[in-house]
Image (cartoon, coloured by chain):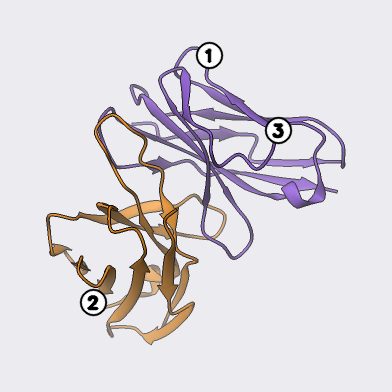
Chain colours: A orange, B purple
């Protein structure tokens, strides 16, 4: 089955700096890669996603890049703010027509944005 | 609109007891997923429903775990003879037909004493 590895496990940046979180996956058939933000005591919240037919996607301060050949994808947050502090999870799934798209998650990155 | 809701938010039980956890998906979402999240880990897939049927239950750890979705909306995750190792946050997610995107609820924190 799919295996997703995520690094780093913790990341501390100063407000205004950029943060980068990296993930690798094992199943070359995976074709959907979402990123979730989880705050303490809450469920994961989707912040951005990318599909395998796209190399990069951006939404305001957040961007995701995908390298299918190397089987890795990254989350980039620019101009970090204290409210970006949370645990971030990458995930991967294989969505075939009419079948399930269960997500396999990484182990998470705890991001702390300091003033 | 209303998101995915889960009840109870917290459940404390004793080893050996039976528990039921409820998930109300976003209205109109046909797919419903259950995941389990242990402390410091990412969510792990348990079971997926498309409509009323369990399309994939490969993540259920053993036969003490069972889930139903009788009318294709609300789902209940049932755990028999609970063990301390079952303590975790149980997350539910739903998605629209033919969509990859999964929307998560707040989870139920289960503690087995």
Q: Residues within 10 Å of mark 3 (few under 14, many from 20)?
A: few
> Mark 2 sits on what residue?
A78
Which of the two residues, B107 or B63, is positioned nearer the viewer here?
Answer: B63
Is residue B110 visible in the rendered structure shown here?
yes
Residue A110 drawn at (x, y percent): 48, 73
- Give the number of the disc on residue B70: 1
| Label 2 secondary element | loop
Asked if residue B73 is positioned above or below residue A50 in the image, the reply reads above
| Label 1 secondary element | loop
- A75 sits to left or right of B105: left
Q: Residues within 10 Å of mark 1 (few under 14, many from 20)?
A: few
Chain label for disc 3: B
Which of the two residues, A69 or A79, is positioned nearer the viewer here?
Answer: A69
Asked if residue A33 is positioned above or below residue B109 in the image, the reply reads below
Is residue A115 visible in the rendered structure shown here?
no
What is the C-alpha distance between the residues marked 3 and 1? 19 Å
Camera-near label (2 vs 3) is 3
Residue B48 drawn at (x, y percent): 46, 33
- Seen at 42% across and 71% down, the residue is A6
What is the C-alpha distance between the residues marked 2 and 3? 46 Å
């Amino acid at each position: 089955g799919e295996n997703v590895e995520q690094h780093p496990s913790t990341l501390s940046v100063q407000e205004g700096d950029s943060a980068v979180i990296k993930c690798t996956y094992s199943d070359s058939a995976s074709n959907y890669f979402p990123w979730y933000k989880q705050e303490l005591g809450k469920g994961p919240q989707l912040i951005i996603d990318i599909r395998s037919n796209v190399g990069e996607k951006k939404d305001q301060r957040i961007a995701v890049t995908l390298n299918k050949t190397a089987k890795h994808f990254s989350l980039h947050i620019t101009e970090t703010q204290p409210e970006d502090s949370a645990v971030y999870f990458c995930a991967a799934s294989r969505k075939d027509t009419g079948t399930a798209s269960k997500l396999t998650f990484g182990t998470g990155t705890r991001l702390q944005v300091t003033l | 609109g209303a998101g995915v809701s889960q009840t109870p938010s917290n459940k404390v039980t004793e080893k050996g007891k039976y528990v039921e956890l409820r998930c109300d998906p976003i209205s109109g979402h046909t797919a419903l997923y259950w995941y389990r999240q242990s402390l410091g880990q990412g969510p792990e897939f348990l079971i997926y429903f498309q409509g009323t049927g369990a399309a994939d239950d490969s993540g259920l750890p053993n036969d003490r775990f069972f889930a139903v979705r009788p009318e294709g909306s609300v789902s209940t995750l049932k755990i028999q003879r609970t063990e301390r190792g079952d303590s975790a946050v149980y997350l539910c997610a739903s998605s629209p037909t033919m969509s990859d995107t999964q929307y998560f609820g707040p989870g139920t924190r289960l503690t087995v004493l």
